[in-house]
Image (spheres, rainbow, N blue to C red):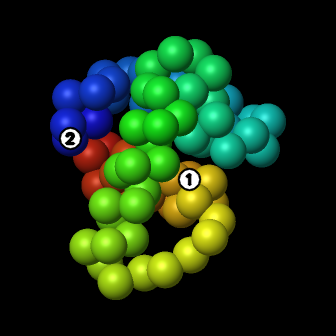
Amino acid sequence: MELGLISAEDMQSALQEHRLTGTRLGTVLADRGLVSQQTIERLVEEFLIQTGGISPDLGRHVDLLAETLVALNSP
C-alpha cells in the first residue's frame, strides 16, 4: 500500500480472505492479480535485508509484513 501498488480496500479484502481461508496473503494478492508473485518476493527480500532477517520461508514473512502494514494503517 505504501508503494501505491494496491489500495487499502484491496488489501483489507485480501487480508480478510487470508484469515478466512488460511491461504497465504501473498498468494491471495497474486491470485487476484493485484501484485505479481515476483514483486511480493522482492519486497519481502528487501524487508529482510533492511531488518537483517534471514529466512527461507518468504510466504510467512509476506503474511506477517502485510498484516503489520494493515494494522499500522488502520484507523
User: Which quadrant of the figure has residue 52?
Assistant: bottom left
Relative to 65, 73 lies left or right: left
For mark 1, what is the residue? 63
- Is the residue 41 above or below the residue 48 in the image? above
45 or 64: nearer the viewer: 45
Q: Looking at the image, which residue is at 52% across and 16% down? A: 33
Crowding around mark 1 (Cα neighbors within 10 Å: few <14, some 14 to 19, many 20+) is some
- Is the residue 32 above or below the residue 5 in the image? above
For mark 2, what is the residue? 2
Screen quadrant of the C terminus: top left
Considering the numbered disc 1 on the image, is that residue within a helix, a strand or a loop?
helix
Q: Looking at the image, which residue is at 56% across and 53% down? A: 63
User: Which quadrant of the figure has residue 59?
Assistant: bottom right
Relative to 16, 9 lies left or right: left
Considering the numbered disc 2 on the image, is that residue within a helix, a strand or a loop?
loop
* Percent position of residue 12, x then y: 46, 31
Q: Looking at the image, which residue is at 20% across and 41% down? A: 2
Q: For the view shown, which residue lies furthest in the top direction?
A: 33
The residue under label 2 is which amino acid type? Answer: Glu
Screen quadrant of the N terminus: top left
The residue under label 1 is which amino acid type? Answer: Asp
Relative to 61, 74 lies left or right: left
* Residue 40, visible in the rendered structure: yes
Count of marks, rendered view: 2
Of the numbered discs 1 and 2, the one sitting upstream in the chain is: 2
Q: Looking at the image, which residue is at 64% across and 65% down? A: 57
Q: What is the distance, in whole Å, between disc 1 and disc 2 at their CAs?
A: 16 Å
